[in-house]
Image: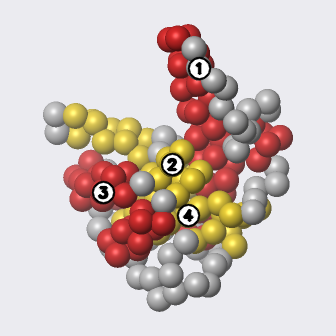
Amino acid sequence: MPIVEVARLSGLRQHAGQRHIGAAWPTCEGVDGATDAMDDLKDAIDVFARFAILPAARRLFLNPQSVRSGSAGPVQVRFGSGWIRFELIVEDDSHVYAIDVRSHLQVENVAVHLKRMERFRGAFGIYRDHVAIGAVSGITIDNDAVAFAHRKGLYVLGEERSTVLIRNRSGFRPKRW
């Protein structure tokens, strides 16, 4: 399986301050401990999304010749009777990539992201002239989630030895929404 290196993560811990990816989570006792652990987990996911996945996605997906490019995250809009949220959105002149970021990516998370992608055009009319492509990522990723996402046409971005890699097999063709 060929692997494409898209970003180095060596500076990740300096951006995260005292909290860093891969740290052992503290043992929780009571509600306060659980709240603190949840805050730490949210911080770890935010650091992973902003300082690992976002730069990697820009480098991997965006056309360097593009006149317009941008990224945002997290993005949440009202859609129907509820909300639709994407952890990261990366765009250039012709494509928009909606990326879900998880602490532990599982098949269930991929299925939820696929449902979000089906609603993407309705929720984000600003991108009606763009090709929409989905991607998922996680600090840890189940092999079943990689296989399922690959079959369904989603890019899978994951960390291996301080590098963000595309985990899809050779010959992968992303689904266009």
Q: Which of the image's four quarters has the C terminus? A: bottom left
Give the numbered dot on residue 157.
Answer: 4
User: What's the distance in space between the residues labelled 1 and 4, CA to CA?
Assistant: 30 Å
**For numbered disc 4, what is the local secondary structure?**
strand
User: What's the distance in space between the residues labelled 1 and 2, CA to CA?
Assistant: 19 Å
Q: Mark 2 highlights which residue?
A: 104
Left or right: residue 153 versus residue 5 is left
Q: Mark 3 highlights which residue?
A: 111
User: What's the distance in space between the residues labelled 3 and 2, CA to CA?
Assistant: 14 Å
Of the image marks 3 and 1, the number of the one nearer the N terminus: 1
Of the image marks 4 and 3, the number of the one nearer the N terminus: 3
Q: Which residue lies furthest to the left in this view?
A: 81
Of the image marks 1 and 4, the number of the one nearer the N terminus: 1
Q: Which of 85 and 17 is in front in this view?
A: 17
Select label 1 or label 4 by which is in front: 1
Of the image marks 3 and 2, the number of the one nearer the N terminus: 2
Q: Nearer the viewer, residue 71 or 165?
A: 165
Please state the horizontal and vertical placement of residue 83, each as a whole percent of the image. Answer: 28, 36
Left or right: residue 104 versus residue 127 is right
**For numbered disc 3, what is the local secondary structure?**
helix
Q: Mark 1 highlights which residue?
A: 28
- For badge 2, the amino acid type reads His
- For badge 3, the amino acid type reads Ala
- For badge 4, the amino acid type reads Leu
Q: Residues within 10 Å of mark 1 (few under 14, many from 20)?
A: few
User: What's the distance in space between the residues labelled 2 and 4, CA to CA?
Assistant: 12 Å
Q: Residue at x 64, y 72 (%)?
A: 64
Q: Residue at x 22, y 34 (%)?
A: 82
Of the image marks 1 and 2, the number of the one nearer the N terminus: 1
Q: Which of 123 and 37 is in front in this view?
A: 37
Q: Residues within 10 Å of mark 2 (few under 14, many from 20)?
A: some
